[in-house]
């Protein structure tokens, strides 16, 4: 009985660890998604700004305005590079959280397997005991008939 209770407790703890790991993985995926969206937004903004620069250049643009465009585009490129690095970090965090979740899930499955085996062994023992009792009952009934 105590062994069964201990196994159930360990299995419950493993379930909680899987749930916590899944929550953490979800947080990491949301952070990664947000970083991806921000990067995409910056890249779209850069494309729009580059297109605006091209249009302005085709119509004629002053040197000061051209320098402002160039400085802003360089600033955008730096921001995009930083966001790419940030996205790479988020992807790494997601990979780590996924690895932890898989490990916790595997541990839970091991506890579940042990619990299932224990339940099967207990059922088998109970069935054998029932069979033994039925055999003894049948044997006594047979003896009574012969007496």
Image: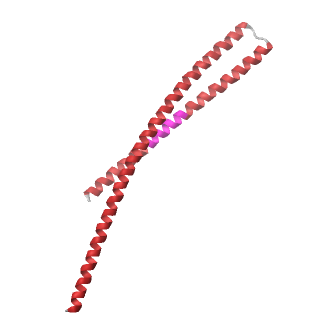
* Residue at 26% in and 56% down: 3
Q: Position of residue 58 (x, y in %)?
A: 79, 15
* Colour option used: secondary structure
Going by the image, does 73 lie left or right of 35?
Answer: right
From the viewer's perspective, is residue 54 above or below residue 28?
Answer: above
Quadrant for residue 18, please give it: top left
Q: Based on the displayed image, in which of its 4 quarters is residue 135 positioned?
A: bottom left
Type of secondary structure dominating the magenta stretch: helix
Residue located at (37% from left, 55% from top): 113
Residue at the left extreme, as displayed: 147
- What is the residue that sits farthest to the top in this orientation? 63
Residue located 43% across and 42% down the image: 101
Residue 49 horizontal/vertical position (percent): 69, 20
Q: Nearer the viewer, residue 50 or 135?
A: 135
Start-end of magenta stretch? 20-32
Number of labelled discs? 0
Residue drawn at the location 35% of the way across and 48% of the way down: 13
In which quadrant of the rendered image does the C terminus lie?
bottom left
Q: Is residue 25 magenta?
A: yes
Q: Position of residue 23 (x, y in %)?
A: 46, 41
Give the quadrant of the N terminus: bottom left
Residue 133 or residue 14, whichever sits in front: 133
Q: Give the answer, above or below, for where 124 lies relative to 39.
A: below
Image spot of residue 123 (x, y percent): 32, 66
């Amino acid at each position: 009985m105590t062994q069964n209770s201990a196994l159930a407790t360990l299995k419950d703890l493993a379930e909680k660890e899987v749930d916590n790991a899944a929550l953490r993985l979800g947080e990491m995926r949301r952070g990664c998604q947000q970083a991806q969206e921000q990067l995409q937004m910056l890249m779209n903004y850069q494309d729009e700004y580059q297109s605006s620069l091209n249009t302005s250049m085709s119509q004629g643009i002053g040197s000061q305005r051209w320098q402002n465009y160039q400085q802003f585009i360089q600033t955008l490129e730096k921001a995009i590079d930083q966001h790419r690095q940030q996205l790479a970090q988020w992807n790494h965090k997601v990979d780590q959280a996924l690895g932890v979740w898989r490990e916790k899930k595997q541990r839970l499955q091991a506890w579940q397997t042990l619990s299932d085996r224990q339940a099967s062994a207990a059922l088998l023992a109970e069935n054998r005991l029932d069979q033994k009792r039925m055999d003894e009952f049948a044997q006594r009934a047979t003896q009574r008939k012969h007496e």
